[in-house]
Amino acid sequence: MFHRAAVVIAAVATLAPRLAHAERVVTGSVVDHATGMPVVGALVAIGSVDAATEDDGTFRATNVAGGRLDVVVIADGYRAYFGSTRAGATLAIRLEPEGTSSEVIRVRGRMPVTPPMQLDTQAIRDQPGAGNDVLRALQSLPGVARTPFGLGGLALRGTAPRDTKVFLDGIEVPLLYHFGGIASFIPTAAIDDVVLEPSGAGVRYGRGLGGVAVATTRTGRRDRWRVGGELSLIHAATIAEGPGPMRGSWLVGVRRSYFDAIEEAAQLDLALAPRYADAQLRWESGDGRWMALLFGSDDSLRFLPSEGSSGGIDTSNVKSLSYASRFVRLGARYRAVHGATSVMVLPSVGVDHVDARANHEGVDKGMERVTVPLHLRAEVATAALRGTLTVGFDGGAQLHSYDMNNTPPPTAMDPSPDDVVHRTLDRWASDVGVWAEQSWFVAGDRVEIRPGLRADRFGLSEQVTLDPRITVHEVLCHGLRLTQSLGRYHAPPLVTDYDPIFGDRIMPGSSSTQVTAGMKQQLGDDKELSATVYYNRLGELPVDAITSATPASANGSTESGGLLGISRELVDTQFGSYSYREGIGSGHAYGLELIGRRTAGAWTGWVAYTFARSFRRNPARGDTTAPYVLDQPHALTIVGSTALGKKWRLGGRFRFTTGNPLTPVAAAYLDASGDWVPVDGAILSQRLPDFMQLDVRLDRAWRRPSGLWKLYIDVQNITNRSNAEGVTYNTDFSRRSFTTGLPIFPSIGVEVIP
Amino acid sequence: MCAAAAVLAACGDGIVVEPVDEAVSGARLMVEWVFYGDGSRQPAPQAFYDTELHARCQPGTWVDGTRRCIPVADPAIYTRPDCTVPIGVGLTNQHPDLFIGYEIEFGVARPKRIYRALAPVAQPEAAYQLSDGECFGVGATPPGIPYFALAPGFDGNRMAVIDERDDGADGERLAQVVVESSDGLRVPIGFRDREAGALCEPEQRASGTVCAPRAAPSDIYLDPSCREPGIALFDGPQPSVVSHPGPDGCRLDYRVGPVVEGAFYRRNGAVCELVPFDGFVRGYRLGAPVEPIRLEREVDDATGRRLQRVTLASGSVRARSDRMFDTATRDECRPVAFGDVLRCLPARAAHATYLLGPGCGVSVLVAEMRAPACAPVAFAMSSADGFPEIRAIGDPAGPLFDAFGAAGCVPHVPPADHVVYDLGPPIPPETFTGGRIAGER
């Protein structure tokens, strides 16, 4: 048991105040993890403020400080609970009896005052279909488009996956998910906090058109060394934490999949053999001032030649294929609080390496791409102008290097390239951003006004952008909270749009204007309703500018839609150079998100409905506006779980989304070589059948001296419904069939939480 | 709010959009379309795509007399004198899938069997053909083309039966001619003037758009001064409508009148001369005038497209024209083949002809047209290297000449009311919207 005073002191020391004044209330409930019964009389420390739970397990901490707050809960017979939160949050905390542990994970639609969603660690871990992965669980949230086969990628509020920026402790992550979206780049056990802002993000983060996902790693416990892990059908992971220098702590994790080994050993007749691994090493000083983080991810994929097609894609001409994608990041953070001023400095360095090789029609093709980012993030927050002023620097330089041996994409000068061309690129480019944000609380702290301005210079496009943004929060009567935001966003071009084959060019970055308005109503202590409307206008989007030689309906262009088009959206930033693009596209997206959630009681979970439309216009395709490839007008997600006695827990997730758009083959003709060539129908004018899937998960827990042992059985698509994810055609395009998604897919694993 | 919604709903109910009779594919036979580069398209009803045989097919008469959609394929011949071993002749297709075996009946080749192509084989020494139930040698096979062994093949029952009929409301003069098949294919291919008893074609005239009946031109005069026009016909089917220029030189249509006995005449320049017809030809007077059916014409306004579809309507018939409206030339166009590519060339084009310059040393391409024209014409068409060549019509030309043997180089005298116009340089084909025929899927 930790001493109360020490805990509170430690919590106060790690504060980074962000709000000068706030409504400053944190509420919530504390229950027994296994039984769900309220824990009465628990001490809840929110930063420097203490509160005690009532008879029904609820607590209310008032006048808490702004910014990230450490949370400590202490109750007799239970392990101490460590987590973090922000003012305005409502927490649902489950305490483990002595000998077990728990952490808090929060997933939010907006921060900090009115987060529409907060999920604790257990809710994430128990979420059916999420595969024990917090970042995969984000895909069940409203505003997040569903990707085929769970391929991953966060496409938020009508924007592309590449428009979403993901950060781990402030360090940008180049690839959120391992290949195929099976798992994210970091295991849940290493994460303390995830904040998802689907749109309307503040000026702290830039160079993205969509939302921002910010994950925070967990501080390892330093009383003694502990080891936990996970063993499942697809991967094994271990995580250890213990005392470190400067009275600090270590957190070490490593994970590797073995699907490739199983596939090889069992001699399964599958075309692709994926493998992934990731590792994390984190140290934080005891006073929270210093933190160092090293993390990396390694994906590789081998293609095992077979006849015909794979996943609906014609692979008959592919003799071999190998793909490897790796990245590593090393960062060090210093932060300190002096009176009303806080300082944070975070330098980081990394290496990204993508190596793809293939033998296509007897010709060796390939690409090796190395990116070395050197980055510095720094910010200072202080009381000024009768509020809180925060200024920051967010920039650095990147070495872009690639070596490519491939048939170049069609260009205006060569609309039908046939020959494999070798080209190389080595280029330094610096992207530098500075920002300032002011926060005022008015009307008796019931209204927060947070204007900001961000300026960026994009090195590749030699472009300077100015992004003003403003967010307003209001706390009204009866627990009703409103939020409005308006902002301008810019993203730089991709380096692959500067392929030497395209000659000297300046490709502008793209832009968006985002407007959101939301309301959230707390109903009692355990229920909440929220609604958000948004509108995004997108400009200068990169679109395929040379289209005449390549039918969209069959060649996998973005506008083909279905599986091929979406796949291109997902891997665009890694490969690029699929096509000659110009920043002449535009688009708009709008939607309504409704969430009803119950956070405590016999059943917990949420019902989320999203009406969302997203459109794109490519002038090279004519003067028409077509749906975006991930335009899914209707999405319904129902997530629920309940305890079955003291040891068992049962949960389910049902998802419905409108089928993705696709470009039909309108007709076909024989070319001179005797091959059938499709003729495009109206671009993205048809849709795949609607998607429906039911996932079920069953958990069983055992408490042992070594920690909490959990067995989970997670069955995705338990009804074995054949969901169409793409289309394939016969030789003369007279017959169309669907590529179906994941069949019934059981996942069984054992997890040890020390 | 509710009242407003009701008003809006009522407004919506009040909007009536006339359905347009458009080509519709069947479950098996698919319509072929011309897909233009600007995104527009129009049916190409000459052929369809058979999704069971995986082949293009065209309406034709099978050997049993049934109208079927017969695959577009090269012919099969026989290599033995007993006509038992067929072989495919790759006349036009280097990658053939099907071949057609024919039998000649009374001099007409009728398709009798469809064969699937196997491997290429050597050129056979001789070719044989079935004719009226017997096997005849037809000489040596042509060299330099591929020949293919054939699988046993199948007969006409595997092909879709098609029907061509008139479709229109009872009592209405205009009917639409449609091709249909039992699998649901329905393709309008033209119009029929029921009253005139003839197919008719949309035509833009100074007075508006009409469906001009297909007519035979009057080719004789019934009097020695060439004032009363008539038509000379052989025995056999007679045309229903005869056309003859009116006083203004523009076309007028007439029914075929009664038979006329006696001599017939024709104009040769300014001379009216006797026509030495034999006894197989009969002369007919022109009957009652035929007024063409007036059509309502409507041009689509599809955003961003150079070519627009044209809708024609009369009575209950409302159908698409076989021509597109080219917004660049402000004139109608129709697809013309340039190798593998089609281009929508002006539908109304004068014929370009060569005259000679002064001294008859240089040929000059000109257009000789009636003035004033019955309908405005902006382009003239000629042919170069087997491809159409389009030129813009310019100003009236200066003096031009004809070379007449012993008469030498004499000034060219246009017919009465005709003017010779200069032509501009050839317009690059790429100027006109390109397209390609492809079968619907």
Image (spheres, rainbow, N blue to C red):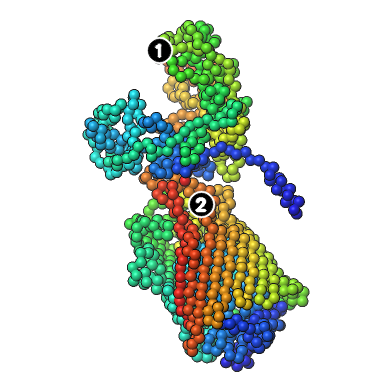
Which percent across, then down, holds residue B212? Answer: 55, 25
Which percent across, then down, holds residue B176? Answer: 54, 31
In this rendering, the label closer to the viewer, 1 or 2 = 2
- Rendered image quadrant of residue A321: bottom left
Task: Tell me the residue that label 2 is attached to.
Answer: A663
The residue drawn where x is 60% and y is 81% is: A36
Q: The residue under label 1 is which amino acid type?
A: Ala
Q: Residue furthest front?
A: A645
Q: Is residue B37 above or below residue B137?
A: below
Q: Chain of mark 1?
A: B
User: Circle 1: is it few (<14), some (14-19), or many (20+) Cα within 10 Å?
Assistant: few
- Rendered image quadrant of residue A532: bottom right
Q: Chain of mark 2?
A: A
Measured in 3D between alpha carbons, the distance from the residue under mark 1 to the one under mark 2, in whole angstroms, is 69 Å
Question: What is the secondary structure assignment of the residue under circle 2?
Answer: loop
Instruction: Compare residues A135 and A580 and report the one nearer the observer.
Output: A135
Residue A613 showing in the rendered view: yes
The residue drawn where x is 55% and y is 34% is: B321
Which percent across, then down, holds residue B97? Answer: 34, 42
Question: What is the secondary structure assignment of the residue under circle 1?
Answer: helix
User: Circle 2: is it few (<14), some (14-19), or many (20+) Cα within 10 Å?
Assistant: many
Q: Quadrant of the N terminus of chain A?
A: bottom right
Q: The residue under label 2 is which amino acid type?
A: Thr
Residue A328 showing in the rendered view: no
Q: Is residue A71 above or below residue A622?
A: below
Task: Tell me the residue that label 1 is attached to.
Answer: B406
Which percent across, then down, holds residue B24? Answer: 51, 40
Q: Is residue A148 left or right of residue B85?
A: right
Q: Residue furthest right?
A: A443
